[in-house]
Amino acid sequence: MHFEGESAVESFLHHSLERFKQNQDGGQANSTERYLKFPSQRLEDMQEEPRSALASAILQRTRGATPFSDEFVLQLTGRALDAKGNPLTDTLQQEHYVEHKIVMPPELEQALSQAAMGKERRFALPDGLSRLLIEHAFLGQLDVQPIVVHSQAQRALKTCSLWAEKIGKERLRIDGDSEVSVAADGRGGDKAVFSNDVKLHWTGFADFNGTNLTSLLLLSRGFEKVRWASPGATSSATNKDDALNVLTGGHIFDMAANVIFGFEGKATKTRSAAVASAALDRAKLAESDNLSHRIQQKLSKLQSSLPPRIAAGGDQELLEPRMHKIESLMRAERPDEAEHMLDSMLTMINTPGHPLATPTVPSAQLNLPQRIQQKMTTVQSRMPAWIEAGGNQLVLAPKLQQARSLMEGGRPDEAERMLDSALVLMDHPDQRPERPFGGKAWQPSQK
């Protein structure tokens, strides 16, 4: 979740590369290293078993063993401009620069081709294509994406007027305007405050070969006003070490500037997703018997381990929803995920301080430094499972950071109270904040 300064990021990348070299084909048993903060605050490793059949099928996709097919890929580049209309030179921040690829769904290509057939006058671009373009033309992290609903915020598509007209047998000229906005005043869960207003004018061309879209070139210019702030965020954009220490909160920004976005699209050869998926399915079938056997063994181990731990004071309320989840995953024919959930629960009951584990020495019997250490260990060990169950790390992580700061400042009583507050948050599901992004796991940024 965090790094101990800029040098730790480089160390992390080197360390990851060396670990990959030790088991490149995935044929050996592997353990996943987990860190709350790299490298000092390491959590318990997650043990995995070798899955040679699956690993081989996945590696085939990267070694050219699967056929290729056509996909229409859009390359997006967006920039914020200064007062003279020149691109800002600081491209490290997402509110200044964006660059990523978008695969256009085949049905949108077909919809554009069909809309253009037999029409000599201007016609509206298909709604799906217009939304695809507009929803990606913005600066800032994914939370401030204007019209994609993935957080508790007010969103509006105020103007969506993109048009096309034929200017040749197989060419369309495109133009139009768009205006979108999003705003949240203390979003539920992480209390983030943000807004984004984007108003653009679009121009460009689309070329066809028969009914196949061969190229798309679009330019949109306009104005964007975007801001972001959340608990734990830092206003020091120049201090990288501070920023890496509060990654979950992001950095504060408030930008109002002219912007420009370019889309360059063309048909390209990509590995066939259907063929790769079929190979993966065959690999899953090849190991299905082993998977079923492992799941049965782990279920038996879990069922025999839980009663004595619950009798000794383990928290039974954390058990029922996870068992229901495992049952649902098995009914939905998702045994890999069910096994992962079982592994997670087995890790919990063997993690000191976790509510499903055998209780540790009561805090009241320890002195203040020992109590603080025990509570810090408990929070850190339970945090991954709590987040997996829907807890919001943006709320919990700042409490841990503040507790450490209080300890360093010679204020242990206040540090203990802060840790008690974190434990109360984790112990009461009704107080657990909703996960950002609508309950889904965090997705990589568009950089």
Image (cartoon, grey):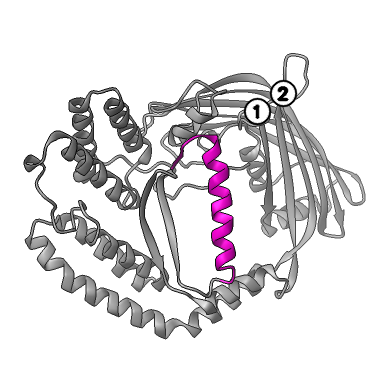
Q: Which stretch did the figure color magenta?
A: 1-25
Label 1 residue SS: loop
The circle drawn on residue 96 is 1
Residue 429 screen position, x and y as percent = 22, 46
> Can residue 444 be seen from the camera position used here?
no
Horizontally, residue 80 falls left or right of residue 55, namely right
- Asked whether 281 or 403 is in front, the reply is 403
Residue that lies at the very extreme toward the right in this rendered image: 168
Identity of the residue drawn at 84% across and 52% down: 118
Note whether 215 is above or below 398 in the view shown. Answer: below
Alpha carbon of mark 1 to alpha carbon of mark 2: how far? 7 Å
**Residue 343's quadrant in the figure?**
bottom left
Residue type for callout 1: His
Q: Quadrant of the N terminus?
A: top left
Residue 364 screen position, x and y as percent = 7, 40
Residue 285 screen position, x and y as percent = 49, 83
Residue type for callout 2: Leu
Horizontally, residue 114 falls left or right of residue 301, namely right
Would you say residue 16 sits in the magenta stretch?
A: yes
Note whether 409 is above or below 30 in the view shown. Answer: above
Residue 305 screen position, x and y as percent = 17, 69
> Can residue 382 be seen from the camera position used here?
yes
- Residue contact at pointers 1 and 2, CB within 8 angstroms: yes
Residue tagged 2? 88
Disc nearer the start of the sequence (1/2)? 2
Horizontally, residue 166 falls left or right of residue 310, namely right
Counting other residues with Cα less than 10 Å from the Cα at mark 2, is it few (<14), some (14-19), or many (20 or more)? Answer: some
